[in-house]
Amino acid sequence: MATTTSKRRRDQPVGLVAGGLIDRRTVLRRALALPFLAPLTHAASAESVNAERPAWMRAPGVPMSAYGRPSAYEADVVRAVAQEYRGIAPEAGVSLTPLHRLRGSITPAGLHFERHHSGVPQIDPGRHHLMIHGEVERPLVFGVDALLRYPVETRIGFVECAGNSFPNAADRAPAKTCGAIHGLLSNSEWGGVSLRRLLDEAGLRKTARWLIAEGADAAAMVRSIPLSMALDDGMVALYQNGERLRPEQGYPARLWFPGLEGNLHIKWVRRIKVSERPAHSRDETSKYSDRLADGSALQFTLEMGVKSIITMPSGQMQLPRPGWYEIEGLAWSGSGRVRAVDVSADGGHSWVAAHLDDPALDRALTRFRIPWEWRGEPQVIESRAVDESGAVQPTREHWKRRYAAGQIYHNNAIQRWRVDAQGRVENHFG
Ligand SMILES: Nc1nc2c(c(=O)[nH]1)N[C@H]1C(S)=C(S)[C@@H](COP(=O)(O)O)O[C@H]1N2
Ligand SMILES: [Mo]
C-alpha cells in the first residue's frame, strides 16, 4: 500500500492545497488510501506475536475495584497547576486540562480544569443549603436532598474561564503545551435542576431582572447574572458526566450556564438573590471586566466568543518524521453551534474547511480534523472558527488592537503553531 500511495503522490498530487492540507472532497475519495501511521507500525509476523507470552498472560490479573483509575502508564496525563500566590495562598489559582492529551470532546471529571479563589471547601451535603430570596413571592431554602428530588435534566456543554489562554497575553510566545495555554476549558455532561423551575416555584416578581449568586467557599464568591440569560438553560448542576459533582467542580451544587464565562458558574452555591440590579461585586468590576484600547472598560462580557485551537500537533510536540498526519482540534462558541472551522498551513494565506465531528452541539466543544502532509519544512498551522451567528474568530493582531495593554480576559484569538524543519512544534505569535 505504501508503494502505491507514494507512486500516486509523485504522479498526481491532486486535492493537495497550500501547505499540504487536503480538502474535504479529496478526503472522502482518498481517506483510506493515505498511509497515516503506517511508517510507525512495525512489521511483525503472526508467529512472533504468538510466540510471545508476556507476564500478564501467565498469571491471573488483579481483581475488580470499587472505583476505577486510569492505567499507571498514563500517569503523566494530568492537569498543569498554576498558583497565583504560591507560598502565601497555595489554594488560590488554577489547574489546566491537558487538552493536547485527550482525543474526545468530553473531559474526564478528574481532568476538568479548576479555578479556585480560595480553595476547595470540603462540604458535608447534609449541612449545605441553597436559599432563593429577594424579588420573589416565596423565599425558599433547599437542602441537597430536596434538590435531588427534582427531575434531573442533562446537557453537554463547556466551561471556559474568562482568563483562558492567559499565557498568550505575554509579548513573546511562551513555550508551553496547548493544555498549559488553553486548558481553562473543559466540556462535560451536566445534570441538574433547571433554574427556571426553581425560580418559578419561588415566584418571580415583576421587578426581577438579575440573579446575584453566592458560593459557600471561603472566598464567598459573588456574581450577578441577567435573569434572561439565567433562564436560557441555566441550571443548578448536581451531576458531572453521570456522577455527582467532584468537590473541585462545586459539590454538592453549582450554577452552570451554557456558553457564559466560567466565573458566573458559582460553585458550592448557597444563595441566589433575585434583584432589580446587579451587585457590582469585585469579580464583575475590578476583575473579569475588559479594558479597551481607548481607556474605557467593558463590564459584563458574559458570552464567550467563538474560538478554536489545534490540539494536535501543538506546542512542545515533536513530529517523528515527514509524512501524513491528521490535524485535530477543538472549536466552540458561547452563542451557539460552530458552523465551520478553516485551517491554514501556510501562515494564513490559504484556508481549507476542516471536517466537524458529530455531534456539533450548541455551546459545546466540537472536534475538527483535516489530513495534512508535512514535508519536513518549517510551516505555520492555525485554525479559525465561525459560529452560527456568523461571528469569526479574530487574529491575534485584531484582538490585541481592540484592548488596552495587559488585557487577558476574553482572549479568543487564533492560535498559531510553528513546526520547524526538525518537526518540533512551538507556540508562534508571528
Ligand atoms: N464559589 C466559587 N465559585 C466559582 C469560583 C470560585 O473560586 N468560587 N471560580 C469561578 C471561576 S473564575 C471559574 S472559571 C469556574 C471554574 O469552574 P471549575 O473549577 O469547575 O472548572 O468556577 C467559578 N465559580
Ligand atoms: Mo474564571
Image (cartoon, rainbow, N blue to C red):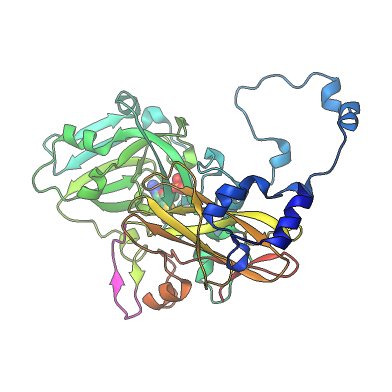
Figure quadrant of residue 382: bottom right
Residue 217 visible in image: yes
Taking the image as shown, residue 319 lies to the left or right of residue 355, namely right
SS majority, magenta? loop
Of 25 and 355, nearer the camera is: 25
x then y, percent, for residue 398: 42, 75
Of 387 and 62, nearer the camera is: 387
Figure quadrant of residue 315: bottom right
Of 360 and 88, nearer the camera is: 360
x then y, percent, for residue 57: 83, 23
x then y, percent, for residue 430: 56, 76
Residue 90 visible in image: no
Instruction: Identify the residue at horizontal 42%, vertical 68% (top origin).
Output: 394
Taking the image as shown, residue 47 lies to the left or right of residue 72, namely right
How many numbered discs sit on the rendered protein?
Answer: 0
Taking the image as shown, residue 423 lies to the left or right of residue 242, namely right
Instruction: Identify the residue at horizontal 29%, vertical 47% (top origin).
Output: 213
Taking the image as shown, residue 174 lies to the left or right of residue 156, namely right
Of 131 and 102, nearer the camera is: 102
Q: Work out whether 127 lies above or below 76.
A: above
x then y, percent, for residue 17: 58, 65
Q: Which residues are magenta?
A: 292-302
